[in-house]
Image (spheres, grey):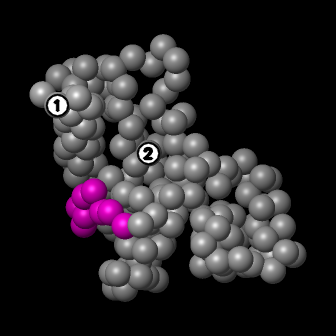
Amino acid sequence: MAPGARHLQHGSAAEDLAARYLAGQGLSPLARNFRCRFGELDLVMTHGTVLAVIEVRSRVSTGVSTPGATVNRGKQRRLIGATRFFLLRFRQFANWPVRFDVVEITGELDDPVIRWHRAAFSVDDVAARSGVSTATVSRVLSGSVPARPETRERVLAAARELDYRP
């Protein structure tokens, strides 16, 4: 086995588990490992008329931190940017509400503990609080397009208020 290959195999197996678990909860798969210049989306699924973007995190041990705690500001920014790209590529979903979920898988993969955190973070919450469009919030938080300073500050203040970590 090549160096580093074991963690990739573990990650792929964890994504398989998460996809099966979520399908059992009523979600339908759209894409897996969608890659673009902003990063990768592990799973993209529909849940009714909601587009669910799912980040899968797994660890054998939670001694240091939970897997979900590793979805930090930088990762959230990359997920938002990759989701914007996904929505540009698949325009039939452009007007769907988007939800960002995290699936944590802990323990050995043959006897895992699976935790599904729906709406682990949300662009819509920040948009509603700041009074600007979701598209503007996405641009500000991903840093892809500069915004007027007053708009940027409103978005960031709303994100802080909601404890949303872009």
> SS class of the residue under badge 1?
loop
Look at label 1 and name its amino acid: Ala
Q: Residue at x 32, y 63 (%)?
A: 35
Q: Nearer the viewer, residue 24 or 162?
A: 162
Residue 33 shows in this picture: yes
Q: Secondary structure at mark 2?
A: strand
Tell me the amino acid under the disc marked 2: Val
**Which span is picked out in magenta?**
27-36
Residue bearing the label numbered 2: 102
Q: Which mark is residue 2?
A: 1
* Magenta span: chief secondary structure: strand
Q: Residue at (45%, 51%) from the top-left corner? A: 101
Count neighbours of disc 2 (C-alpha within 10 A) and say few if under 14, some if 14 to 19, many if 20 or more. many
C-alpha span from label 2 to label 1: 29 Å
Horizontal and vertical percent for residue 21? Answer: 24, 43
What residue is rendered at 60% in x and 78% in y? 135
What x and y, as percent, mark residue 65? 52, 23
Q: Quadrant of the N terminus?
A: top left
Q: Total of numbered circles in the picture?
A: 2
- Quarter containing the C terminus: bottom right
Q: Is residue 31 magenta?
A: yes
Pick out the residue farthest to the top. Answer: 63
Between 36 and 119, the one nearer to me in the picture: 36
Whether residue 18 is situated above or below residue 39 in the rendered picture: above
Q: Dot 1 surroundings within 10 Å: few (below 14), some, or many (20 or more)?
A: few
